[in-house]
Amino acid sequence: MHGSPACINIAGMRRLLFSLIALLGLVLDGPELRADPSQLVIGISQFPSTFNPLIDSMAAREYILDMARRPFTTYDKDWALVCMLCTSLPTLGNGQAVAEPGPDGRRGVAVTYSIQPQARWGDGVPVTTKDVLFTWEVGRHPQSGVADGELFRRIVAIDVKDAKTFTMHFDRLTYDYNAINDFALLPEHLERAAFANPAEYRNKSLYEADTTNPGLYFGPYRITEVARGQYVVLERNPSWYGRPPAFARIVVKAIEATPALEANLLSGGIDMVAGEVGMPVDAALAFERRGRPEWVVLYKPGLVYEHMTVNLDNPMLADRRVRQALLYGLDRESMVRQLFRGKQAVANSLVNPLDWCADPTVRTYPFDPAKAAQLLDDAGWRLGSDGHRRNAQGQALWVELMSTAGNRTREIMELVAQQAWKRLGLTVTLHNQPARTFFGDSVLKHAFPSLALFAWMSAPENVPRAELHSTMVPSKANNFAGENVGGYRNPRMDALLDAIEVELDRDKRRLLWAELQALYAEDLPDLPLTFRADPFILPVWLKGVEPTGHQYPTTLWIEDWHVAK
């Protein structure tokens, strides 16, 4: 590590932020919690900005909806691709997937799926290929505002064999040709009217206008009550075709402040804290040290990448030397060591070392204030006698750092970054928002001035096309579809993303992945912070919860959850 470590007063920040929860632990230490087989109450740290399964990609929404829906395909806890709504996984080997000529001379592929025969929407209407065709129509429309429009645009045709069987024709043969995890089915018989004006669909959808309509769901549960910003109630779905879930009713409470989340746990207001969107690691470690035998804490390292996305349309951050200086000026090793005590690590790339395609030789940015200062000088931001950096026109260098309000770990990381960058001569302001506003407006609409601190959750070997391809920048023209919220545009990155997807040879793909990571580390469209471990705080009587370590949450297997006998 270059340079001498700066003094980061994380300990003081932690003492200040933990004082409230320590007090709450004394006064709210309620009676021993007992299992209630009729109801499970889950605490999460965010409330969804929407319940439509195609709009945005907020983790809180996925966590809740995956109790009430099922994807055609997904990755399980062993990171294997499996069928859920389909009856068997089509492959080139079993003949249910067949390579065929595609448009523009590329190799395409035809993939045949069969829907579970007994699958019905909550109002009793069968789930059929009509829903498949309608979902494709919505997904590929340029004004619908879906998060992953690229998936739908790649489907050039869908042939319907019968009410339960269909063949998708893709314009290219990719290494993950049979994974249609994000083809989130919509009920044609209910949503057709809402899609009359595609540009207004995100607001007119019944998932927003009539969220408790039973016909919107076909999973083990259906949503029966919603208090916006507060809680969601799910009850058993009588039309569910699979094994009945153990709990008659599940309540998901959104508690955005970490101390309040723990206070509710201690007082019996909630039974557990979700790992995927719950308590930060430092808070879970503090909770564990207090030695509460009623709960067990599980730490699951996974494909969760905490970072600061850079608004590259901000002229002050357009020069990558400035972005590199920001990263060199941040002592991430000390921050991670003091906050997380070995439970998670510094990220040097967007690809987690747990994934086979991670490049161990990727460029790193050790703490080096002198190098950071030199890069800022080289970029034309000189340090004045007043301690502030300005360019030749006298403009001061400043950044605004935004994140989710109430997340204690992110608030500490923000304070550390603010102090570190002020020592480099920057003006740094903090502006946090409730998660539903931060993700639903500021991030989604590319409306944060400088930096947005949040996490990406990904699947195994997930090509970050939606996050990095130049065609995926959200804008008013495309109704804010796409997840390249920083506005990153690099033709070489586009070419690498395109090439990786269609390279079926794993060894050749590894080389392309290495080049992608090298380019990412050089350009820094995001400032890497950590690869997260998610703490699951579970009552000792709850069994069957198996963390996956990727973006598809434990709630996809909610019917396995049960009270210990």
Image: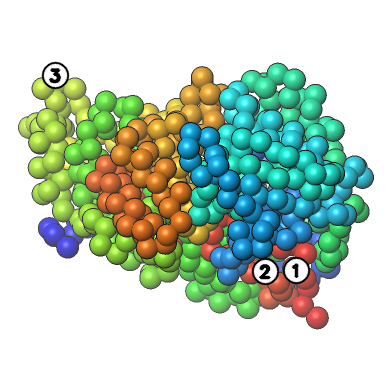
The amino acid pointed to by label 2 is: Val
Residue 282 visible: no
Label 1 vs 2, first from the N-terminus? 2
First in sequence, mark 2 or 3: give its number. 3
Q: Earlier in the sequence, mark 3 or mark 1?
A: 3
Q: Which mark is residue 545?
A: 2
Residue 30 position in % (x across, y down): 69, 67
Which of the image's four quarters has the C terminus?
bottom right
Q: CA distance from mark 2 to mark 3?
A: 58 Å
- Looking at the image, do the residues carrying marks 1 and 2 touch, with CB atoms under 8 Å apart? yes
Residue situated in front as seen by the camera: 377 or 113: 113
The residue shown at (19%, 39%) is: 321
Residue 139 left/right relative to 457: right
Query: Which dot marks residue 560?
Result: 1
Expressed as whole percent of the image width and height from the top left, the position of residue 283 reads 49, 62
Who's the residue at 64% across and 33% down the image? Answer: 139
Q: Which residue type carries mark 3? A: Gln
Q: Nearer the viewer, mark 2 or mark 3?
A: 2
Q: Quadrant of residue 452?
A: top left
- The one nearer the camera, 495 or 194, is 495
Q: Amino acid at mark 1?
A: Asp
- What crowding class fits label 2: few (fewer than 14 Cα within 10 Å), some (14-19), or many (20 or more)? some
Q: Which mark is residue 393?
A: 3
Left or right: where 276 falls relative to 528: right
